[in-house]
Image (tube, rainbow, N blue to C red):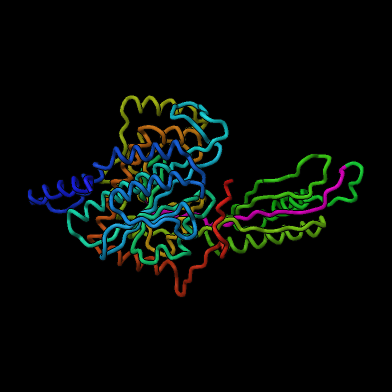
């Protein structure tokens, strides 16, 4: 195609000039994708589609890659918005992850003050529009680099929906999407630049739906059995349980259905629980205890309870072999620099913070290399237990910005987000080139993963054999 022809011609000019294939060459290819990736990111930012409902966002990314001669497989693992785009042949297979789901209720204009454009609408408060756009840009640049150099390798861009509570990657991992992959690269928007190895918590969630018997709450209360009583009794017992759980455990819930009217004994009520801990085994045990509390609550209130496991994630398995490579590349590339308009935008955003966590200017810096244990969860975890996996963050948000905030949506919709995204594209592409050209790195990363897994490791998804909850955001 015309686009591919231009890139190949550019590469041939380099070859005629006897410039060897190295990192500078791949960065030129990434630069050629910059404007297209900004357009994609802005399109996804405006679409702001929720998990498993990202039909237009997914198609936008697929079309971009198909135009660049990737082979695209749609509807992977029974998920309509999941896809795998492949380019190249033979050699090592490097997978790049691309997320694209938004969060509910965080609609925001790209301005440095709270401005809701559409009340109740979703917004990209975790920057997954930037994630997806940066990853496809890096994949396209790598494809052009393979054409130019003639190196045998395979690039596999995996479109992963519903990271926010939907565990999209778990279903892909369970379906064997990563079985033929040698290394996985991913990244995430943030308020800082860091390639330090890190882990997360394992996580399992469930909806507990209690069913009772409706009655008039004033004239015939004795005939009713309150499903809401079941929910409240369960919550009370779980809150007592908090005194007797491991220190790093996290248990949180929200009542999603409490009944219809005060004068009706609730026939149905529901509570939604998350259980977290750095160790998957602890999550399994804690979730069983929460289920016991639900069963006891149902017994005590003469109601019935049904449990639906909604999602489950392994903790991220850090890979120091790969993390050191990414860190060195990030230091080499450097951080983000604001122009005057961006500086003013950032100052206004920081004025909205109640707590100043990070100073302006830190976006230019690279955070020191040091292991970090995070308390959040991500479905990247399951992938990282199967294939050597490495991730990083870039400063797509104003320093001090919290994820899942309107400030993150605002910065992600303008040039500050675009600059962080472009840095991510460069880092993904450069690291992939390093791995393709250094099979010994892949071998060392694989050996490290096997040691971390431990003897006899067999993967079993924490969410069991349930089908993807394609309607969980409806």
Q: Residue at x 32, y 59 (%)?
A: 94
Residue 209's x, y, as percent?
A: 70, 54
Residue at left offset 24%, top offset 42%? 32
Q: Residue at x 8, y 51 (%)?
A: 18
Q: Reply above or below: 348 against 393.
A: above
Q: Position of residue 184 (x, y in %)?
A: 36, 58
Query: In front here: 165 or 200?
Result: 165
Left or right: residue 62 compared with residue 69: right
Report the span colored magenta: 196-217
Task: Pick out the residue farthest to the front.
Answer: 1
Residue nearer the viewer, 76 or 416: 76
Viewer can see residue 425 = yes
Q: x, y (%) of residue 398? A: 41, 34
Q: Is residue 135 magenta?
A: no
Camera sees residue 327: no
The residue most toward the left is 17
């Amino acid at each position: 195609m015309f686009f591919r022809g231009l890139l190949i011609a550019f590469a041939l000019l380099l070859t005629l000039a006897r410039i060897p294939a190295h990192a500078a060459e791949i960065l030129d290819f990434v630069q050629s994708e910059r404007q297209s990736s900004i357009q994609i990111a802005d399109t996804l930012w405006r679409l702001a589609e929720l998990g498993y409902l990202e039909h237009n966002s997914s198609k936008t990314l697929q079309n971009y890659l198909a135009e660049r001669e990737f082979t695209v497989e749609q509807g992977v693992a029974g998920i309509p918005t999941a896809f795998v785009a492949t380019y190249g042949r033979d050699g090592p297979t490097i997978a790049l992850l691309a997320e694209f789901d938004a969060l509910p209720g965080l609609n925001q204009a790209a301005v440095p003050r709270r401005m809701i454009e559409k009340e109740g609408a979703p917004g990209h408060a975790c920057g997954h529009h930037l994630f997806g756009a940066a990853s496809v840009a890096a994949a396209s640049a790598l494809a052009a680099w393979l054409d130019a150099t003639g190196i045998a390798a395979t690039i596999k861009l995996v479109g992963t929906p519903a990271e926010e509570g939907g565990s999209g990657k778990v279903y892909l991992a369970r379906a064997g999407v990563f079985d033929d992959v040698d290394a996985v690269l991913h990244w995430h928007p943030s308020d800082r630049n860091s390639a330090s190895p890190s882990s997360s918590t394992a996580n399992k969630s469930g909806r507990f739906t209690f069913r009772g018997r409706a009655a008039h709450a004033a004239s015939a209360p004795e005939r009713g059995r309150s499903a809401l009583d079941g929910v409240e009794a369960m919550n009370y017992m779980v809150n007592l349980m908090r005194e007797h759980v491991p220190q790093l455990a996290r248990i949180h819930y929200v009542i999603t259905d409490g009944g219809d009217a005060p004068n009706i004994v609730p026939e149905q009520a529901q509570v939604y629980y998350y259980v977290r801990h750095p160790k998957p085994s602890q999550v399994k045990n804690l979730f069983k205890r929460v289920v016991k509390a639900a069963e006891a609550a149902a017994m005590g209130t003469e109601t019935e309870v049904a449990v639906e496991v909604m999602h489950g994630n392994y903790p991220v398995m850090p890979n120091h072999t790969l993390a050191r490579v990414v860190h060195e590349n990030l230091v080499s590339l450097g951080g983000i620099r604001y122009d005057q308009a961006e500086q003013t935008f950032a100052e206004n955003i920081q004025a909205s913070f109640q707590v100043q966590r990070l100073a302006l200017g830190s976006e230019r810096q690279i955070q020191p290399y040091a292991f970090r244990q995070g308390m959040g969860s991500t479905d990247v975890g399951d992938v990282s237990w199967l294939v050597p996996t490495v991730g990083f963050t870039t400063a797509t948000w104003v320093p001090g910005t919290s994820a899942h905030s309107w400030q993150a949506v605002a910065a992600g919709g303008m040039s500050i987000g675009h600059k962080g995204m472009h840095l991510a594209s460069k880092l993904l592409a450069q690291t992939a080139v390093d791995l393709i050209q250094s099979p010994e790195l892949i071998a060392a990363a694989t050996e490290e993963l096997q040691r971390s897994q431990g003897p006899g490791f067999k993967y079993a998804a924490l969410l069991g054999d349930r089908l993807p909850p394609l309607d969980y955001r409806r």
